[in-house]
Image (cartoon, grey):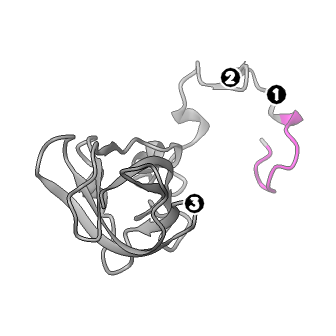
Amino acid sequence: MGVGLLVIASIGLVPSSAMAEVPSQLEHQGRLLDDSGEPVTGEHTLTFTIYDSEQGDTILWQGQKTVQIEDSGFYSTRLGADDNPLEPSVFESGDAWLGIAVDGGDELEPRMKLNTVPYASIASRAEDVAEGAISSDDLSDDFEVGSENISQVDWQSVSNKPSGLDD
C-alpha cells in the first residue's frame, strides 16, 4: 500500500528551554493518505530529513518519530528532540527542504520548503546584541513607531513606563 502526504497543516519553531533562546525544535503537523485517498491510521514511524535543496542529497538533519495517526489521517509531532536538536547551522544557508518517509519506505514527494517564521527572522540579530546595547541614539531619525517618526514621539504621553525611564 502506497502512502502520500496530502497536506502539511502547520510548521513552527518551538523554544527548547529559555524564552530568549532561538528555538531548536520544529512543530510539525500533517495528514497521511494512501494511494486511494483514504486516511492512513494507527502507529507509524516517520523519518524526517532536512536537505539543503529540493532535489539534492545533502542531509542537514535527520530524525525518526513514532506517531499516532488519527482516524482522519492527521498527526502532530515535534522535530529536534533534546537528544537530536535542530542546530542553527541547519538553517544557515537559507535553503532547507523537509522530506518524509513512512515506515522505512521511499521518501514522499515533493519535499517541502521550510520558510522563515517571524520569530526566526529577527532572532539571529537579536541574540547577538548585548543587554542594554541599543538606545534611542542608535535608531535612525526615520525610524517609525506606528505612523509617527520616532523623533516626533511625545515620550511624556507614553503610559505604563517602567520607573527610571522618564527623561
Residue 143 in percent (x, y) is at 59, 24
State the image quarter where residue 87 is shown: bottom left
**Which contiguous range is marked in magenta?**
156-166
Image quarter of the N terminus:
bottom left
Judge from the rendering whether residue 60 lies leftward or rightward of residue 120; answer left or right: left
Q: What residue is at 55 percent from the left and 31 percent from the top?
A: 139
Element marked by disc 1: loop
Callout 2: few (<14), some (14-19), or many (20+) C-alpha neighbours within 10 Å?
A: some
User: Residue sitting at 85 percent across and 38 percent down?
Assistant: 158
Rendering coords of residue 147 (x, y %)? 73, 20
* 157 or 22, nearer to the observer: 22
Residue type, numbered disc 1: Asp
Amino acid tagged 3: Ser
Question: How many discs appear?
Answer: 3
Left or right: residue 6 compared with residue 95: right
The image position of residue 21, as x and y in percent, is 47, 64
Q: Is residue 150 left or right of residue 167?
A: left
What residue do we see at 57% from left, 60% from top?
72
Pinpoint residue 27: horizontal percent, then vertical percent: 48, 61
Magenta highlight: main SS = loop
Q: SS class of the residue under badge 2? A: helix
Judging by the rendered image, the residue that carries numbered circle 1 is: 154
| Tag of residue 72 | 3
Q: Nearer the viewer, residue 150 or 45?
A: 45
Q: Nearer the viewer, mark 1 or mark 3?
A: 3
Near-viewer residue (59 or 138): 59
Asked if residue 16 is positioned above or below residue 35 in the image, the reply reads below
Residue identifier under label 2: 151
Is residue 23 on the magenta stretch?
no
